[in-house]
Image (cartoon, rainbow, N blue to C red):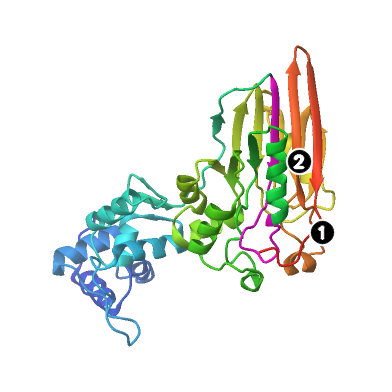
Amino acid sequence: MNNQSWTEYEEKKAIELRTRGLTYPEIAAEFQKDELCQPRTSESIRLRTYALTGKVRIKPKHKEKPASKPTEEPASKIIDILKQRRVATLTELADELDTSPRRTKEGVQSLIAEGKRLELKGETVEFMAPKGGKTTTLKSEGDGWCRFGLVSDTHLGSKKQQISALRDFYRELKARGITKAFHSGDWVAGKNIYRGQEYELFLHSMREQKEYLIQEYPDEGIETIGIVGNHDFAWSALAGDSILEMAAMVRPDIKIVGEYQAFVEWNGFRFSLHHPDGGQAYAISYKLQKLVESFTAENLPDFVVMGHFHQKEYVTIRGVECFQPGCFEAQSPYLIRKNLHPAIGGWIVEAQRKENRTHIIAEFLSYKPLERDW
């Protein structure tokens, strides 16, 4: 921080700029341009301005009614600012809110207590920091065989969802005595993922998609362990809440273990669930190959399950059994524009490790798309 004494010129300039509506970082930038001013941090300018005059109120930049006091709606304002910035210091937030860092910290702590996904690290606030990479251990069970279903990209709320096929898939799992399924993301359709998506939805709000997920996602006595995909996370970015974590609070058969990536250990096998970003590569297996290559030798899982691309695939890479689980959404106008053809269905897998032998049986259940399956 600059410790040189303030001149009368600097003090007048700081107060005048603040009164005109500039934020403290903007005033600091103006000081940098002025040869008569010492370079000063936004925090030092804020403290000096407070010491001289108390809190200098910002005049509205437009002819609108003055902003409400911070005590009226601080929560929504903090969330709105962090949606844009993702990471901000308490001082920066206080400057935007025209209040003190102490009251801003209290507002952030109140939001965290309400369940909003904010992280307060010292003087820094982070909005919706992705969770991923952790390992969840499930209770071992059964006769040594590991039997499970693999699903992904169910996109509930989309006009192209295939919930009839999804229900049939879960009934088949139950008929075979399977008690677990792994979901590699995009449980719901989300919002604002791409231009024109609003015309491809029949459920448009977070509340509608959450309630539909809770009421309609198949149960059949099967526990579904999964991760958050980019369509699910879209609601987190918009609202500051995790739609899947809220659903899991009501549905004990749904277990969310990470965002975009997570590891699960069960019955002697290690699973890696992934929901990557970006478009489909020319070769369907390319993204899986690059993912498996990124693992160190000591961290290689037994199974990799990669969603997002709506493709079906089973290939062994570096001794790892790698799957793309398909999807439960028919070809949407967006996929038509991208010339992408989804594989509707899911995998049923049985695995057993005995001495130096691993036995794998994998079967893909494929479905024809239905129109207006909602």
Could you say whether the residue bearing mark 1 is in a helix, strand or loop? loop
Magenta segment, which residues? 144-163
Which numbered disc, 2 or 1, marks the residue that appears first in the sequence?
1
Judge from the rendering whether residue 108 lies leftward or rightward of residue 165; answer left or right: left
Is residue 41 visible to the viewer in this orientation of the structure? Answer: no
Q: Nearer the viewer, mark 2 or mark 1?
A: 2
Judge from the rendering whether residue 313 lies leftward or rightward of residue 172; answer left or right: right
The 10 Å Cα crowd at callout 1, few under 14, some 14 to 19, many 20 or more, is some
Outermost front residue: 175
Outermost bottom residue: 63
Which of the image's four quarters has the C terminus? Answer: bottom right
296 or 245, which is in the foreground? 245
Q: Is residue 276 above or below residue 53?
A: above
82 or 365, which is in the foreground? 365
To which residue does mark 1 refer?
341
To which residue does mark 2 refer?
347
Q: Amino acid at mark 2?
A: Trp
The 10 Å Cα crowd at callout 2, few under 14, some 14 to 19, many 20 or more, is many
Question: Magenta segment: does it hold 153?
Answer: yes
Q: Quadrant of residue 347?
A: top right
Q: Whole-percent x and y of residue 3? A: 24, 54
Q: Residue at x 26, y 75 (%)?
A: 58
Q: Residue at x 62, y 26 (%)?
A: 266
CA gap, disc 2 and disc 1: 18 Å
Q: Whole-percent x and y of residue 170? A: 68, 44
